[in-house]
Amino acid sequence: MIKINLKNSIIDINLEIESTSFVALSGKSGSGKTTLLRVLAGLEDSVGELHVESHVWQDSSTCMSVQKREIGFVFQDYALFENMSVLQNLLFVAKDLELAEHLLHVTEMSELKDRLPRTLSGGQKQRVAICRAMMKRPKILLLDEPLSALDSQMRSNLQNEILSLHKEFGTTTIMVSHDPSEIYRLCNRVVLLEDGKIINDGSPKDILLKTKGSQKFSFEGELLEIKKVDVIFIAIIAIGQQLVEIVLSSDEAESLHVGDKVNVSTKAFSPTISKN
Amino acid sequence: MTNTIVALVKEIKSVDNLNIVKYDFNGTALSMMSLELSENVKVGAKVRLTTKPTYIAIAKEFSGDISYSNKLHVKILHVENGELLTSLKIQVNGTTLESIITRDSSDRMNLHVGDNVTALLKANELSIAEVLV
């Protein structure tokens, strides 16, 4: 069990996390997600208590240094040592060649171990960063939007690798993410932050299914146009990068105005699905 | 919110996350198919149900059996004929609903204000808009 009761000028967090669980931190920018990770790592000051299993990392009298905390940290921007090879980046953290080779094998990076970071693609650099974070066999793995700069295929590959490392090493993983599919695939719990405080906490399905009543197929959109056709109305709504059309009755149309933010939903029984 | 019906939850049958909820709507039984229900949907709860006007079918002098779980005996209050479609305002148990059907069907069935007809609605096309108490 990891018991977090920490506050500073940005966050005020009271949270208990089961060991070996995979938790997503979500919320708008400025909600304190990255600050919480940095506070857990000891990179930012806070007051309160932090207990990791039977160890006290922080309380009123002690504050363990960054180096002593058994933490692996992966940033969005990789943060590799540019003058060191892939293998040297890993060995800098811990002189454990066997572990380094194993991690590079798991992430299919063995053949690139002597390359310098600048010669690697974004996905390869992030693999190195993830391997490096695992070199301390961390109790807690902190991931700050690790995959947000990568394309969707690369994201999917790295998600699988992160999950298998998380399981193999039995780490407790806390990941900042905005991507619902990523959260659903990897995490067993989502903690939603706003203004430095927890405003929602539950399973990915409970938190991410933005549903009202029994409607399970639900999207936020903006009403672009509404026009009368025969005895019905047709609304054009922008949802993400897509436009959709929805048939409305005159009563439904009456309360809507162009520019309104709307929620478009239907029951799970209605949509049809086909492969691209 | 339009096309809504206030009803009481009478019974909930569940298999995994699939549910059939039975309602009492002023003496008329209704049935709804749903995946997960929110926690406050339980027997005795009062809910506002909703459906799209295009989901409500109309039958005249209806006899025989049909798989549609929800059959409402309604009176036609208003008929608005378009070129292709017809909007009907129908009333049942003090509640007014709208049904949108094709103009062809409306003409074929010779639907008029004051007619007593049956409104048909499948269980999967009824949903909960709001839990009231």
Image: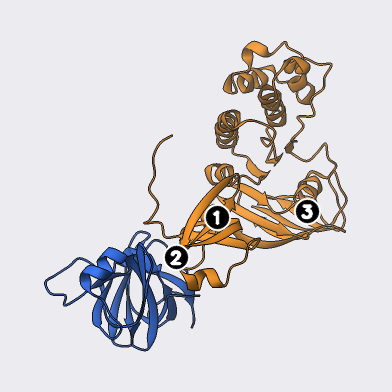
Mark 2 vs 3, N-terminal side: 3
Which tint is chain A? orange
Which tint is chain B? blue
Q: Quadrant of the C terminus of chain A?
A: top left
Answer yes or no: are tags 1 and 3 on the same subunit. Answer: yes
Cα gap from disc 1 to disc 3, whole angstroms: 36 Å
At label 1, the amino acid type is: Ile
Give the structural element (helix, strand or loop) at label 3.
Answer: loop
Residue at image coords 16%, 75%: B62
Residue A214 drawn at (x, y percent):
44, 66
Cα gap from disc 2 to disc 3, whole angstroms: 46 Å
B95 or B100, which is in the foreground? B100
Residue at image coords 58%, 42%: A182
Q: Which mark is residue A236?
A: 1
Residue A85 position (above or below residue B46) = above
Residue A76 position (above or below residue A43) = above
Visible in this render: residue B18?
yes
Q: Residue furthest front?
A: B83
Q: Within the image, what quadrant is residue A16 found in?
A: bottom right
Q: Within the image, what quadrant is residue A48 found in?
A: bottom right
Q: Around disc 1, counting alpha carbons within 10 Å, would you say few (fewer than 14), some (14 to 19), or many (20 or more)?
A: some
Image-based side of A86 in relation to A47, left or right:
left
| Residue receiving disc 3 | A32
At label 2, the amino acid type is: Ile
Q: Around disc 2, counting alpha carbons within 10 Å, would you say few (fewer than 14), some (14 to 19), or many (20 or more)?
A: many
A86 or B113, which is in the foreground? B113
Chain of the residue under the numbered disc 2 shown in the image: A
Residue at image coords 86%, 47%: A44
Residue B93 drawn at (x, y percent):
33, 88
Question: Pointer 1 and pointer 3: residues touching (CB < 8 Å)?
Answer: no
| Residue receiving disc 2 | A232
